[in-house]
Amino acid sequence: MSTTCCTCFQGLVGRKKQDVHRRRSGSWQPTAALVPNEMTNVWASPVPRTFRDDKDGADLDLVMSSLDTDVPHVPGKAKSKSNARRRSKFEIEQLTMSPGSLPKPLAPYEREQAIRRLQPTATYEMLNQVPQEVLEEATAEAQELRRKLTKGATVVFISAGYPGKRFIFERAAALGVKSVIVDHPDSWSRALVDEGIVAKFLEVDMGQSSEEVFKQALAAISELGKDGLTGTADGIVTFVELSVPMTCRLAEVLGLPGMEPQAVDRARDKHRTRAALKDFGLPTPANYLIKQGSDLKAAAEVVGFPAVIKPVSGAASLGVKKVTSFEELESGYLEVAEELGSLVVSSGALTKASNGTKGVNAKSVVDLTVLLEQYLDGPEVDVDIIMSEGDWRYAAVSDNGPTLEPYFNETWGLCPSMLSKQQQTELKDLSVNCCKALGFTSGVFHVECKYTSTTGPQLIEVNARMGGGPVRECNRLVWGVDLVEEAIFVALGIPARPYLPKVPYTCIGYTFVNAQKSGKLTSEATAKFEAWRKLPNVLSSVPLAKTGDTVVGVKDGLSTWLCELVVTGKSSEEALNYFLKLENDAAADIE
């Protein structure tokens, strides 16, 4: 079988048809319309310039995933055997002391030496055969060309995450990518090889330290291409939070496109993030690093109240709590330290320990440093960003519902945002500038912000990866932008220029149905969750708890998520009202 594949482009800016060949691709081969709504333009443009002029829309199939793999485990949800394994040194390091024992970033001259030592990737050779101005167009033809250039590429995925992230590998296979997964031997994802979705699964013992995991992964990746099944690595990427620091370091050593490790390390350390923003002249709330209990008084004097305690390194709402007085700060600090000490990590994701779960007490492994930060009021948003070649190419603003304080549990989301166009523009500009302040020049980012009543837009955090949960589907269905596809482009060094409609295709609303009171979930509730799937304009209803499960209400702690519900509407307001009505109907079904 030939190990060379060919693509071509024609009709772009008057050029003739041209064949572009990929060499050393390997023999392995992988075995899915919405029409834009006529709506009032009340959203900020997600792109710097070109829009779609067509009215036919894209061929978009609905594929809803399970909950974001980078958020806490939901009590009562069934766990696979692979998710119950003992926590690894690698995961604990990346959770509590990132980057842990991973190697230091290369100096600029070392990066240059690494690139010079290596042969150009097959993708890079193909890119050199295509005029740069063609690759940088934001048109339908140029987007199709970028997809064709991706076909046959060998892309390494570091950690697969939970089974809910299967859609990532399905999309890669649809693009013709020869996917290689690096993960623990018991990962669910190794079965994707037998299904013909993934080319290879590389076993790495994730129970070791980050340093050893890095060495084993590097050695395994360096062997790619020798058996003729795949080519050598053209790109390396991850969609799992705890694997981001290792992924960027592997890309650096291998001379592949990727984010600079220094930028990733700054983004994963909330205290360093605030310092970088301040140096860049961007707004940042008052904050103080708490390394031990004796720091509480000084922290209170600098930050004041109300304030928020949060882990320096972490994700989602775990270990985050609002405090309104020094007494609450003292008790809250002890509570947060205890909560962090009970964390469990699986497949690169954060979870809460539950009955029968085996794990390592984080307090016995590292010093748990937290940040006290000025409380930010106002509406919260997500800004999903694509950066390529030093600048932003896409930035879409979505609304987040009010979190459930004092633990800041997430509630619902809307895409596109219902905030004013001016507010959306300010939030988008801040998010892009925060990515630049941290040192990022390319990648897919999930940025969380608030629009405060006194100081306008303020950053919560920058996640150097695609957002979890319904984030990919919201961007794909509303704007026709597939963040999985764009992340693969960036990993291969292909310029990202998403091609968008002038107006959104639809409006999406989703809610994580929180238990309103503590007790046991009734069969009436779970029956409603199942029945929602058959209702018009419901895209998905994924139960997260079972009949008889003991759940925690909003007044008694970090509330239990009962169901993930996703709906569509002619406007964001219509979608919001629809899922709130359904959610209220199920509020009393706890006994």
Image (cartoon, rainbow, N blue to C red):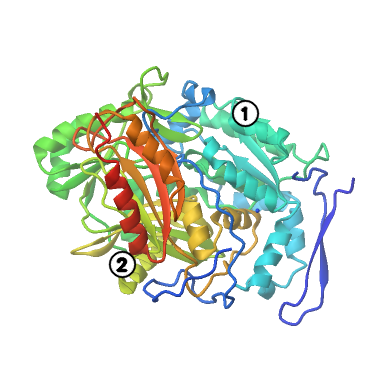
Q: Amino acid at mark 2?
A: Leu
Q: Residue at x 38, y 34 (%)?
A: 526
- Looking at the image, is 97 positioned above or below residue 390? above
Q: Residues within 10 Å of mark 2 (few under 14, many from 20)?
A: some
Q: Secondary structure at mark 1?
A: loop
Q: Earlier in the sequence, mark 2 or mark 1?
A: 1
Q: Which residue in the protein does label 1 denote?
A: 204
Q: Which residue in the protein does label 2 denote?
A: 419
- Looking at the image, is 161 positioned above or below residue 548? below
Q: Position of residue 248 (x, y in %)?
A: 55, 46
Q: Position of residue 36 (x, y in %)?
A: 51, 70
In this view, the mark in front (2 or 1): 2
Q: Residue at x 75, y 65 (%)?
A: 128
Q: Position of residue 346 (x, y in %)?
A: 47, 30
Which quadrant is home to the C terminus?
A: top left
Compute the Cα span from label 2 to label 1. Answer: 46 Å
Asked if residue 227 lies left or right of residue 286, the reply is right
- Looking at the image, is 355 positioned above or below residue 452? above
